[in-house]
Amino acid sequence: MSNEPRQQIYDSTAPSTDTRESRMGEGVDDRFNSKLREAFGASPFILTKFDNFMNWVRGSSMFMLQFGIACCSIEMIHSYAIKHDLDRFGAGVPRASPRQADVMIVPGTIVSKFGPRMKRVYDQMPEPKFVVGMGSCTISGGPFQQGYNVVKGAEEIIPVDIHVPGCPPRPEALIYGVAKLQERIANGESSPVVVKPYELEEFGDLPRDELVQKLADQIDEDDLVMRYNWADSP
Amino acid sequence: MSTELERAVTETVTEEELEALIGDRALARDDHKNAPGFVVRPDDVQDVLLDLREEAGFDHLSCVTAQQYEDRYESIYHLKKYADPTQEVSVVVPTSVDDPVSQTAEPVFRSADWAEREAFDLVGIDYEGHPDPRRILLPETWQGHPLSLDYDQEKPQIVTLTEHANPIQPDHRDEESDTMFLNIGPHHPATHGVLHVKTVLDGETVADVDPDIGYLHRSEEQMCQQGTYRHQIMPYPDRWDYVSAGILNEWAYARTAEDLADLEVPEYAQVIRTMSAELSRIASHMLALGTFALDVYGDFTAIFQYTFRDREIVQDILEDLTGQRLMFNYFRLGGVAWDLPEPREEFFAKVRDFLDDLPAKVAEYNDLVTSNEIFQIRCVDTGILEPEVAKQYGCTGPVARGSGIDYDLRRDDPYGYYPNLEWNVVTEDGCDNYSRVLVRMQEVEESAKIIEQCIDLLEEWPEDERNIQSNVPRTLKPDADTETYRAVEAAKGELGIYIRSDGTDKPGRFKIRSPSFHNLSALEEMTKGEYIPDLVASLGSLDIVLGEVDR
């Protein structure tokens, strides 16, 4: 018996060798080198600004926060799920923890009780972070704008980069909004904040008006509170 | 005694018998369109309700409505029977404006616990003897009661962000026990939205559960009270149970308003309504199944995506029919917005394709989910909800039917085209998480049966008899002080609406009885003493939707 492998093993390995050779060609493996690489010549380098490079990287790999509030979250789930598949655009992995996410899609109506919690979740996200407001409720309160308990838009609490209108927006609209956000990030644009947002403040720091006096025995001085001025809301 | 009670439960109680039973305690009659109403004194509430439950068999406190008039506050207890929901009675309890104190009904019906807390929160009636008189929907520091007449919504409010205190801490300070307080939510993947569950753990066992709701309280009742009957209210029901069960919710409003204003609905429109409602039910149950699989064994890849694949098909069909994927706004008072899309054959073919594929898909789900060993270990005999407990908490829908309560308003309180069709009410006797999933999966098959029969009918319908709406006045003004409470079988259970008209084109009081709200109130019974993973499974099997819990 020789040291050569038996004939049938030779035969059986042939096809896979063929495939590999046709994929990679002969000689040294250069599978990471694209046509673009060839066009640049022998040892190419690119001169760019570090910021541009970072913006491009940020826009191309976004981790979303898994954040369901109201009706829009159903359409948001449909955007993640099959058929629409937001992952195709490098933005499809919902993270359950805000510490791992860099984009927050706000999918729904924000009411007074949830406002401080949303602010806290937003604060927990690492910088740089971006917000996509989904649906009419995050723009103005939408159909519930006149409600006694409804915050008139997400921008009253956190800065919003992209507004996607609709009640609810279709998954395609949300995907367009995310694509627009990616474009803006890649171009290094930022959104101006035009609304003075509600802040989380220590109760003791609030001006002593009638309401604060009334609640003084219910709330500790150093508890964080959010004060809503409904009359000043748009 | 038990035989006497059984007789009372099944037999029809006449108005004379009710009058005799309540006797002198009834100060006056205040009949509603759906039921006889008896006015009783605020300190007779428990007495009267107990008699109605024990002697006359009214074992379902369907809804508690609170409202303020110029001269009084009023709580209305809408009672029904699980055995026959067409038998109804209302107990009306007026209290003075200066001192709105009324006796609590909580010792008689556990479901009054949350319902009265809501009434206190929104309208401001104090319930004497209530075990837990806190606000439920609004933050604890809220000033005023928003649905009372003198509320000024321009006033500023302060809302706190504090760590919630351990609700049972004083009892557990001894050296033996070592409990841990755990906040689940309001932003948490397993809570299906913005629910906050305050949990106290003893090791891995749940020692106490207190669901904290109101993170999506969007003032739906106020919105409906500001809209006109004819057009402005209909878009809102879509947004209560937003899991694409919109059409079922629209039907609740349509049924109530049609009853209030005595509107007829053409038969052809009833068939279309029935078909679209059942499509909605399939979409809703698909999501319930997918998210339950996600909760129980974190299956984001296969089952969750399969259910969403099927939901997409249903949503496509509904979009063809209504023009919207999720918020349909398709029903009108007295009918539907428009006829089936042209060409009709194409629409029928699309629905039939879906129905033809469905049995194979259901079989696939059964292979993947219900016959999966891990799934069964997680679900069988966990989250037990005994039928008597379920009735006490006012549970309805798949949650009640999973506990063996044979209660389905489509059959028991017929509306639409259901009485003319062949289908079955699904019940399971397991009372556990597994039974609730089984009920939903079988209901998908029953819904498919109903849709198929509707399609057959619609195909044959003569062209000149396709009447989609009856004549409804452009401005609808029902007579002043007409009151009615009507319910339909929505995806999660009995969705009821109480409307009082005040003679204008907008309702004087619009109260929503939400099935998820009452189902969620039973969570404590289901999970106390169980392990913490079973709490998550039980929450998933209740299939709540926060838009409907909080409204």
Image (tube, rainbow, N blue to C red):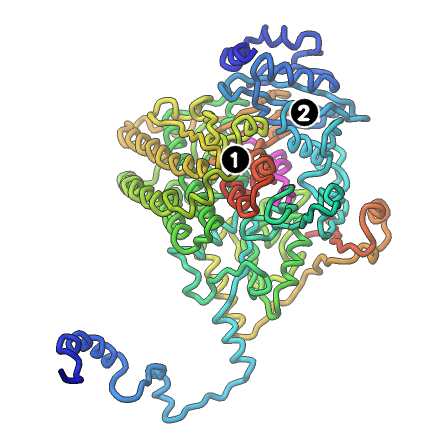
Instruction: Work out which residue is located at the far bottom of the displayed protein and give it.
Output: A42
Give the image location of residue A155, x and y in percent: 64, 58
Counting from the top left corner in percent of width and height, residue B126 is at 75, 29
- Using the image, name the chain to which the residue with label 1 belongs: B
Q: Quadrant of residue B54?
A: top right
Front residue of B496/B25: it is B25
Q: Residue at x 50, y 75 (%)?
A: A57
Looking at the image, residue B396 lies above or below residue B352: above
Is residue B96 at all visible to an observer of this figure?
Answer: yes
Which residue is located at x 73 percent, y 23 percent? Answer: B103
Which residue was labeled with disc 1?
Answer: B384
Q: Which residue is at the front of the view, A191 or A118? A: A118
Residue A136, image x, y percentages: 56, 51
Residue B220 highlighted magenta (yes or no)? yes
In magenta segment, residue B54: no
Q: Amino acid at mark 1?
A: Ile
Residue closest to the eye, B206 or B57: B206
- Whether residue A217 sits left or right of residue B493 in the image: it is right
B543 with respect to A99 (left or right): left
Q: Which mark, residue A48?
A: none
Element marked by disc 1 = loop
Residue behind mark 2? B107
Residue A207 lies, with reference to residue B30, above or below; the image says below
Residue at image point 72% right, 31% down:
B131
Judge by depth and name the residue closer to the eye, A42 or B500.
A42
In magenta, the rendered stretch is B209-231
